[in-house]
Image (cartoon, rainbow, N blue to C red):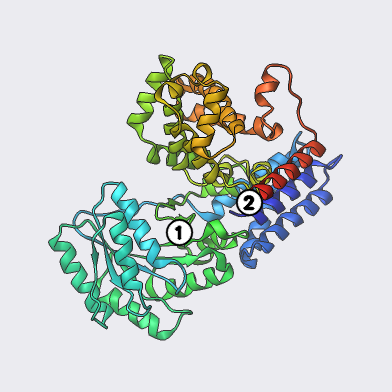
Amino acid sequence: MFDSLQENLSSAFRSLAGRGKLTEANMREGLEQVQTALLEADVSFKVVREFMQRITEQAVGERVLKSLKPNEMVMGIVHQELIRLMGETDSELNLHSGLNILMLCGLQGSGKTTTCAKLARLLKKRSVKPMLAAADLQRPAAIEQLRVLGEQIGVPVYTDFDSKDPVKVCRAAVTEAKSKDVDVLILDTAGRLAIDQELMTELSNIDKQVEPDQVYLVVDGMTGQDAVNSAQGFNDALELNGVIMTKLDGDARGGAILSVREVTGVPVKFIGTGEKIDELDDFSPERMAGRILGQGDIVGLFKKAQEEFDQEEAVRAEERLRKGEFTLDDFRKQMSQVTKLGPMQKVMGMLGLDGGMQEMLDGVDTEKDMRRMFGIIDSMTPEEKRNPKQAIDQSRRRRIAEGAGVAPSEVKGLIEQYDTLASVMKQMSGMGMRDRMRMARQMQTDAMANPAGQLAKKKQGTGKRLSPKEKARLKKQRAKERRRAKRK
């Protein structure tokens, strides 16, 4: 997310940090790099011009120029202005008692139908009773797609495969939703490849005759300025209550999300961060500004952990840790919980470790590695899981490796990982979630400096921090091993 923008902004801040003495002239030079980064990210020219004007007024002041770390002060100014640009946090749907009707509209290919299901799932998790209505009668298979998605998340879907009138479908869906005591009815309306009169007439008819409580536009974040232009066009015709921006996980530029609020005055309510049905998040300008500046999103990760982790299981595991009973079965459960947070690269990004960790994880299939790890544990006896260090000798290691289809060295490596994690988990057992996240972040920072697993050795006073040359050699060696494994 925002790879290119993040990298270019970081470069601008580094150039300011590298100055011997900061003057107004080289400060302006550094700010020009910030401006270029925003324009290359496809942020609206008008928005960039006004944004840079506000930043320049603050950044060339005497207080910044004479500060000990002017680059950090400039970053702080940019951070605050990014938050201001994206508006206040406004992800509440403000639902009233009785039936709430939400209409989702957007261009074809924006991910509207999937977003309807994602929003329904989000509401269901928040103890709201949702229902979906398949009113996209233009796109072949749209009705069936929504029906299947509704089945996956356990949400009812109103469908009428024979009707050609979307207004009639929506009104019938409202009647059914009232009879089923539904809290929120989400209307999936038709899209087009571009805004045209036929589309706007259809949406206006639904708006007038069904009278939805709120109208949300689903826009594809990867379309840059086109996303902003379509948001403006839909807002003029329908008076939008908000925007849901999709496909941000695939957008290296990210300019649309910085422009849409300023250009339309309409808040971004939610963002799609992946293709999976659970990858729809509340939009937070503060957290987004942190991601753009490479500072991560610890709050977002904390929130996701709270939602996804089995809290009862966590309490049981903590109790076992205090008693010194942390086994490989517990280790497996903990790792299963971690996989619920999403791909490891995404988790690293939320920890603010995109750069170095991304290089380390380049070409590494973390999900496959996790499955191999689970296979090793599942090949052990209950006694071996309880006390692996004492119970597993060389012959047992070979037997476990054969059962899991891995090399004996991988079994040994897993046991060493387990020992290290058991020690860390014990330290974490008395901490709150925020302190745990802080500790995890420090561990990841240490891991970046010791990619070959030197951390444990360093603790014993025998390891060395790898030089850039050694890191490069190690990376090449790993790539060779992966290629060799694939050939086999």
Vertical comparison of 46 with 451: above or below: below
Name which residue lies at 76% across and 28% down: 465
Where residue 81 sits in the image (x, y, percent)? 60, 50
Residue 61, picture quadrant: top right
Q: Amino acid at mark 1?
A: Pro
Residue 470, picture quadrant: top right
Vertical comparison of 199 with 69: above or below: below
Vertical comparison of 198 with 52: above or below: below
Q: In the rendered view, does 292 fall on the left or right side of 317?
A: right
Q: Is residue 14 visible?
A: yes
Name which residue lies at 36% across and 51% down: 92
Q: Amino acid at mark 2?
A: Lys
Q: CA distance from mark 2 to mark 1?
A: 48 Å
| Tally of marks | 2
Q: Nearer the viewer, residue 48 or 465?
A: 465
Mark 1 neighbour class, 10 Å CA radius: few under 14, some 14 to 19, many 20 or more: many
Q: Is residue 439 visible?
A: no
Mark 2 neighbour class, 10 Å CA radius: few under 14, some 14 to 19, many 20 or more: few
Residue on which the image places disc 2? 486
Where residue 484 sits in the image (x, y, percent)? 68, 48
Q: In the rendered view, does 34 fall on the left or right side of 200?
A: right
Numbered circle sitting on residue 267? 1
Vertical comparison of 112 with 284: above or below: below
